[in-house]
């Protein structure tokens, strides 16, 4: 992990000394916010995005952040719909926040 821009962390993931994924995370006063994750598609079956989320949650806890923002959730888009499985979470629907435990 290293800092690029101010308050932005780049989390690099390696397998057998080969870069397989990179997560971009912003640090706020009381939260970490996951911005983007890109990865080598050769390792897709290892679920590198899920692994990155878990590492970001652990980092948020270590940094004593109150919140972790997973980013946009688009139910109709398979690449983003997996986010609903991380609980508890809140989804803004029709202008109101819904909480899922």
Image (cartoon, helix red, strand yellow):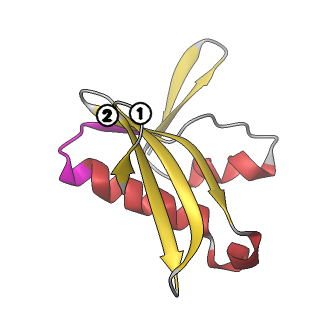
Residue 16's tag is: none
Residue drawn at x 29%, y 48% as measured from the top left: 60
In the rendered view, would you say 15 is above or below 39? below
Q: Which residues are magenta?
A: 61-68
Residue position marked by numbered label 1 in the rendering? 5
Confirm whether the magenta stretch covers residue 66: yes
| Front disc: 2 or 1 | 1
Q: CA distance from mark 2 to mark 1?
A: 17 Å
| Residue 18 or residue 82, whichever sits in front | 18
Which structural element holds mark 2? strand
Image location of residue 49, percent across then percent down = 59, 61
Check disc 2: other Cα within 10 Å, few if <14, some if 14-19, many if 20+: some
| Residue 6 or residue 80, whichever sits in front | 6
Confirm whether the magenta stretch covers residue 38: no
Residue drawn at x 17%, y 44% as measured from the top left: 64
Image location of residue 58, percent across then percent down = 31, 58
Question: Extreme bottom residue here?
Answer: 16
Check disc 1: other Cα within 10 Å, few if <14, some if 14-19, many if 20+: few
Q: Image check: 88 left or right of 61?
A: right
In the rendered view, would you say 42 is above or below 54? below
| Residue 100 or residue 32, whichever sits in front | 32
Q: Is label 2 in contact with label 1 (beta carbons under 8 Å)?
A: no
Image location of residue 21, percent across then percent down = 58, 64
Mark 2 or mark 1, which has the lower sequence index?
1
């Amino acid at each position: 992990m290293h800092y690029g821009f101010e308050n932005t962390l780049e989390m690099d993931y390696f397998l057998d000394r080969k870069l397989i994924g990179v997560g971009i995370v912003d640090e706020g006063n009381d939260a970490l916010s996951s911005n983007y994750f890109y990865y080598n598609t050769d390792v897709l079956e290892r679920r590198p995005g899920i692994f990155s989320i878990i590492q970001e949650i652990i980092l948020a806890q270590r940094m004593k952040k109150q919140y972790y923002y997973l980013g946009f959730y688009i139910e109709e888009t398979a690449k983003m719909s997996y986010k609903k499985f991380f609980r508890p979470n809140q989804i803004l629907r029709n202008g109101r926040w819904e909480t899922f435990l």
